[in-house]
Image (tube, coloured by chain):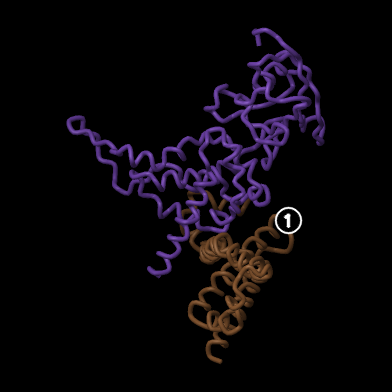
Amino acid sequence: MNTQQISTKQISVKRYLPDSSAESYWQQYELPVDDSTSLLDALNHIKEQLDSTLSYRWSCRMAICGSCGVMVNGIPKLGCKTFLRDYEGDIRIEPLSHFPVQRDLVVDMAIFLEHLAAVKPYLIDDNPVKPYDPQAPETYQQSPEQLARYKQFANCINCGLCYSACPQFGLNPEFLGPAAITLAHRYNLDSRDHGKKQRMAELNRHEGVWSCTFVGFCSKVCPKHVDPAAAVNQGKVEAAKHTLIALFKG
Amino acid sequence: MEKLAMNKPSMGKNSTQHKQAFDEPLWWGLFSAGGVCFAVLLPAVILFIAVLLPLGLLPAEALSYERVSSLLFSVPGFLFVGAVVCLPLFHAAHRLRHGMFDISVGNDALNKKLMYGSAALLSTVALGLVVAGMLG
């Protein structure tokens, strides 16, 4: 904020302080901005200079940690990747939709983490791990072609923006949701993994891939261009194949 | 929160096994096939039957009664009705079912029966008429 100041802007933040009031309310802040002011810079300015009671999450400032997701004029965004120069007039900041609000802009993401854990988003290898032999170290090997199959889906930073964008998750929080299904798909596509059968049982539920109606907003809001909608719909093809195979095997 | 606990990895695959959506791949498959037919075949059908024919741009005998009945009441006619009537019906039923869920109308289990049931009934009637014409 020490570069040249060119103007002031007003942002409205939805406050929720359960210790003092059961109702949420809007609070306006005027702050100095220049072309490089991100929304996260603005929130930090409010916290440090104007109102120390404001609560929000942040860490890395560069769209890696996925902590600073908020609704900006009703659209899920990362605070660090959103610049105030792109907004005219009042800017309304709310906590991420479809999650319980704990305080101000801080939401409870427990349900997202449960869905994530349910699809086992890690390499599953049936073979027992051999003791490490320094003379002949064995590593997982993967060709660039095998890497390319899943690489895009591996860029997820678990920020939860896609869950706030998904109307189906809003209607039914038991829906596994875009990020969890995408990570399941990412590991299913990985040549080193042998856990697809376990994950398909989760994906092929009504609350798995079949709750998706291909709205596609998840892919629009994803700050890392992961394209969860593509992963979910490829997951539908996989779930259909899984069902057919299960029918023939009995 | 009790139901959410079912999703925890510690519950293993047995808890999810009985919740498998065995019917959804079928509805989704019919929806996908119907979508393709809707997009590819129906515009051509509408162009010929609803635009070119009333405008008199087709030869008068192109869709004469004798010609159309011999085309329709045949195996290709049966496939034609399946592709331009039955599959699009299932496509529409799928969209209506999910649309009703989106605006919270009725409950999904009942909507499923109503929507896919109607599509199946109308498809049976359409295909039944073709078969009746072939036999008659």
According to the picture, the residue beneath numbered tag 1 turns out to be B103
Q: Residue drawn 61% across and 38% down?
A: A109
Check disc 1 and give the amino acid type: Ile
Taking the view exactly as shown, the residue that stands out farthest to the left is A135
Which picture quadrant has residue A108? Answer: top right
Q: Is residue A52 above or below residue A211?
A: above
**In-front residue for pair A235/A246:** A235
Mark 1 lies on a secondary structure that is loop
Indicate the quadrant containing the N terminus of chain A: top left, top right, bottom left or bottom right. Answer: top right
- Neighbours of disc 1 within 10 Å: few (<14), some (14-19), many (20+): few
Whole-percent x and y of residue A240?
Answer: 47, 60
Chain drawn purple in the picture? A
Whether residue B19 appears in this view of the structure is no
Judging from the image, what is the letter of the chain drawn in brown? B
Name the residue located 78 percent from the left edge and 26 percent from the top edge. Answer: A90
The chain to which mark 1 is attached is B
Say which of A216 and A247 sits in front: A216
Residue drawn at 73 percent across, 55 percent down: B103
Between A72 and A128, the residue placed more toward the observer is A72
Say if A120 sits above or below A248 in the image.
Answer: above
Q: How many marks?
A: 1
Residue B30 percent across, percent down from the top left: 54, 66
Where's the C terminus of chain A, which quadrant?
A: bottom left
Picture quarter containing residue A166? Answer: top right
